[in-house]
Amino acid sequence: MQAMFKKSLLALALASATLATAPASAQETVRWGIPMAFGSNLLALGDTMPWVSEQLKKVSGGTVNLQIFEPGKLLPPLGIFDAVSSGKVEAGYSFMGYELGKVPVSAIFGALPFGMETPQFAAWMYFGGGDALLKEAFKPHNVYPIFCGSISPEAAGWFKKEIKTPDDLKGLKFRAAALGGKIYQKLGASVTMLPGGELFQALEKGVLDGTEFSLPTVDDQLGFDKVAKNYYLPGWHQPSTNQYLYVNTAAWAKLKPQTQAQIETTCTAGVIMALAKSEALQGDMLTKFEKEGVKLHQFSKPMLDAFSKASKEVLAEESAKDAMFKKVYDSMSAFQNKNRKWHDLGYLPRSYR
């Protein structure tokens, strides 16, 4: 009898051990290569996806491995969307808007001129219907996009000469992305879209008279202050700059719900980490620029009024051309307007902060 009891205990122990290890053994293995649009050395802009990748390894016990590829190593930066859409790669990481020609609404998911800053944009995405609209917009293109990083307002850009009136933009050879580029064109600038790695040389050789790109820390890493000394703020064209993990729809559907949840939750953490890092570093960088002879300018009200007027015209034109663009822009605007009084009354004026 005692021997049978011991055997029963042993069987129970073995069964318990099997149950305990079942969830781990059931966790699927994911090995994806992730081409990136920005170098991982670019603070808060390019190092968010590597952080997400490392966290995913930890939370999954090493079963989810998204291997990062620097720009150009696996794909050119501007080719990520097409590669994910066609299934050439399972996923990629990019600023949303480079695919403007094929998905016009992508531009305002990436950055809406005179739109919401990151905290309010995230509120709209998670609680205002933004994420559902995002998935709807990209479904026809076989892409499942995940909000996976957002940074503080960018700078308005670097200029070789001072920009005092809207007339100073006429004929200016300027680099700008997405809707910002269309707005500069409306004001008379000659706009070129170049990836970040080509901008220093273009400024140095006179191919460009100015460029916008990113945060002060990122602009410093790319050396723009060595070839242009007039730095203009605020980043009216990109109050928030939003990055996404693009996943091929078929590849996403193959994942178990647990793995999907791990990826989406870690990307949500990536949003706050990118914002926190971008906020933490810019004050010191502006001080550094001033010490090195850079002139910091804030665009005057007449200049901002001109940009605002041109922005409204461009957004109206894009809304008229594309129903999804209009649907998303209307949703964004309604959310921003609904919360305007709260922001006006509930937050300290900037001069008191």
Image: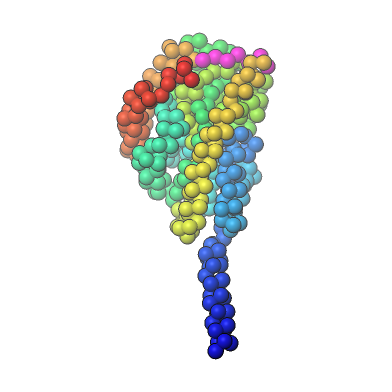
Q: Is residue 99 magenta?
A: no
- Residue at 65% from the left image edge and 36% from the top image edge: 41
- Residue at 56% from the left image edge and 75% from the top image edge: 13
- Residue at 57% from the left image edge and 60% from the top image edge: 29
The residue lying toward the viewer, choosing from 120 and 330, is 120
Q: Quadrant of residue 194?
A: top right
- 167 relative to 31 in the view: left or right: left
Q: Position of residue 161 (x, y in %)?
A: 58, 13
Q: Position of residue 242 (x, y in %)?
A: 49, 36
- Residue at 63% from the left image edge and 42% from the top image edge: 70
- 130 relative to 229 in the view: left or right: left
Q: Is residue 154 above or below residue 297?
A: below
Q: Quadrant of residue 173?
A: top right
Quadrant where the image shows the N terminus? bottom right
- 44 relative to 305 in the view: left or right: right
- 320 relative to 44 in the view: left or right: left
Q: Position of residue 55 (x, y in %)?
A: 58, 48
The residue lying toward the viewer, choosing from 287 and 68, is 287
Look at the image and tell me whether residue 202 can be seen.
no
Which stretch is magenta?
292-298
Q: In the image as oriented, which residue stretches furthest toward the front?
A: 2
Q: Is residue 246 above or below residue 17?
A: above
Look at the image and tell me whether residue 96 can be seen.
yes
Q: Position of residue 147 (x, y in %)?
A: 47, 42
The residue lying toward the viewer, choosing from 153 and 262, is 262
Q: Is residue 296 magenta?
A: yes
